[in-house]
Amino acid sequence: MTNFPAPVAQLIDQAQAHLNAGRLAPAIEALRQAVVQVPANANLRTVLINFLIQNQAYDEALEHIEAGSRIGLFDDGEPAPDSDPDRLYRLGLRYRHLYVDALASPLAGALRERCARYWRWAAQSGRLDLAYLAGVTLMELGLSDEGHEMFIIGENIRDQRVKDEGLENVGLRFIMGDSSISSGIYNVPNLLTSIGIIGTLDIYIKGRELGMLPPGRAVMLLDKSEVVNRYWLDRFAPFIDIITDKDEIARLTPLSPPLEDFLTATMRVNGKHVWNNHAFAQILRCWEDEGRKPLLTLPDEDLAEGWRQLQTLGPKPGDWYVCLHVRDDGFKRETADPLNKGLTNTNNADIATYRQAIEHITSLGGWVLRMGAPESAPIPFQVDRLVDYAKSPVRSQFMDVFLCGTCRFYIGTSSGLAHVPPCFGVKGVLTNWTPPYARPVYNNLFLPKLMRWQGQDRPMTFAESWRKPHGQCFRPEVYNTLGMELVNNDSQDIADAVAEMIDRLAGKGRPDTPEEARRRQLYNSLPERLGIPDGGFGANSFLPQSFLNKYADLFEGIEDL
C-alpha cells in the first residue's frame, strides 16, 4: 500500500505499529480512519475487513464488504458477455482470501457464495484456463462441489470449441508439454516439472488401451518445456508421440487447447466427464480386473547399470531393498502465486518416526534406501543397511527411476515420487497422506493423517474430519483459521503398516475379521454419504488392518451421515 496521501500513510504506519505491539483494537481504529479518507482503495479496505473478522466484528466487516461492492471495489454486478475475465479472476482471488479469513465466522457462508460466484463467472467467460483455474482454486479450498462444477464448465467450453472449429475427426489428443493450458493454472513452466504428474501418463495410457478415453493419436509437443526427469518421461515414449520439431510444433499448437486431455482436472471416461482422480481409480480397477501386467519394464542393460551403481552403496545382487521417501522442507516450491504459497507444507513428515519401520526391514535382511532431494533434512539416526541415497554420489534421474522400479516395495508420503513404483508393479505403503478424504489411486496400503482441534489430544472421527471444507481441502490456512491441525502418523502405525505389507508380499496376509470388514466398508462409504463428486479421490487403496483396529472409535458416526 504505497503512494497514499501523507495523512493516510501516517494512519497506516500507526496501525502497523499497533499490530507489531499486539494491539488489534487501536490498529483497527487507525485503519477505519484511513478508509474514510480513501474509500475507493480495495486493498486498504480488504485489510480492514480481515482485521474486523479477526476481532469478531462481523457486522461491521459485512458493512465494509457491501460498501466496497456498492462502489465497485469487490463486485462488478452481473457480467456482460464482454466483461474482462481478468477482472473476474482478481475478484475471485480477493473473495478467496476473504472467505479463508472468515471461515470460523458467521460470514463464511456468504463469502463462500460470492467467491464461487466470481470464479463461476470467470469460468463462463469462455477461457479454458480460467475455467480450470477456478476449479483448482475451489477444490483446494475444500469446495469440492463448486470446483467440480468449474471443471465441467471447462469441459463444455472445450466440447463446443471442437464442434465450432470442426475438429471432431482430427484424430489427435494432446497431452502436457509446451501447448498445455495447465501451465498458467499451476504457475509452472509446464506439468513436466512434476515427476508425479508425468507418472499419471501410466494411467492415461492404460485408459487409452482399455478404450475408456477419447480415441486419437496421443501427442506431446516438447520444445522449450523443462522436464524434471527426462529418463522417466522417455519410459512413456513408446506410447506417446513426443514431437520436438519446431515447425511441426508451430503447426499443431493451435489445435491443442480444445483437444488436450487435461489429467489434473476432469477427464472424459466412457463418454462422461469425471473428476480426474476418480477417473484414475476407475481405469486402474479395470486394468487389474482384466489381469493386465504393469505397463512399464526396465530394459536389461538399464537393470545391469542400475545394479552396478547400487553396489557402490552396499547392496549386492540377490539383496532386497525398500525405497523410503519422507517429504520434508528440502522440497520447496517457491512461487509468487498466492494460490500456491504454503500448499506443500501439509505433505511433510518427520523421518524420525520411520526408524521403527526401518529397523524391522533391516532385521529381516533388507536394505532401506532413503530417497529425495540432496537438500533433504539429515537422517537423525544410524541403522545398519540404511543408505542415504538422496545425498549419495550416485543420485541421478536414472537411479531415481531404477530404484523405484526394482525395490521390494516403496514407503512414501504425499509426493510425486509415489507415482513411480506402481508403474512397474511395485506395491507401496503410503503414509501421512493428505487431505483427509484423499486416497492414493493405486492398489496400495495407506495411512491418512488424522485431524484434531488445536489444543486437544483426541483425533476427530472420520465423520467429523471429512466434512467440508476442511476435510476436502489442500490449504493449511483453512485448517489454521478453523482451529484445526493435522496429526502425523506415529512410529507404531507406520511400523505396523510396513509389517503388514511384508506379510502380504510373502503370501502371509490374512483376511479381514468381520469387524475390520465393517469398518473398511464404512470408510469406503464416506464419499457417497457426504456427496463428494464422483466418489472423491481414489478408491483402490486400503487401510491397514492394524489401523482399523487401533482407531476403531474413529469410525463411529459414519452410519448417521
Image (cartoon, grey):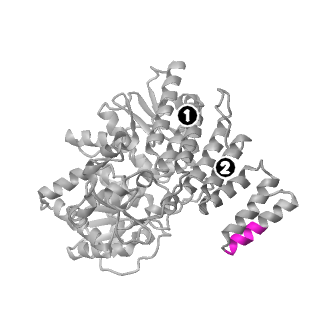
Q: Position of residue 535 (x, y in %)?
A: 33, 43
- Residue 324 percent coordinates (x, y): 35, 66
* Quadrant position of residue 485: bottom left
Asked whether residue 299 appears in the rendered view, the answer is: no
Residue 260 point in image, percent of width and height: 48, 33
The residue wearing badge 2 is 63
Give the camera-side residue of 387 and 257: 257
Magenta residues: mostly which secondary structure?
helix
Highlighted range, magenta: 14-21
- Which secondary structure lies at badge 2? helix
Q: Is residue 178 above or below residue 272?
A: below
Q: CA distance from mark 2 to mark 1?
A: 35 Å
The three-letter amino acid code for the residue at tag 2 is Glu
Residue shown at the point (57%, 44%) measured from the top left? 115
Furthest toward the right, the residue is: 6
Q: Secondary structure at mark 1?
A: helix
Query: Is residue 530 shown in magenta?
Result: no
Q: Position of residue 358 (x, y in %)?
A: 29, 73
Foreground pick, 7 / 212: 7
Please name the amino acid that badge 1 sits on.
Answer: Leu
The residue lying at 46 percent from left, 38 percent from top is 262
- Find the residue positioned furthest to the front: 59
Q: Residue at x 35, y 57 (%)?
A: 464
**Quick check: 548 left or right of 61?**
left
Q: Give the class, few, some or many, for how many residues have Cα within 10 Å of label 1's Cα (few <14, many ≥20).
A: many
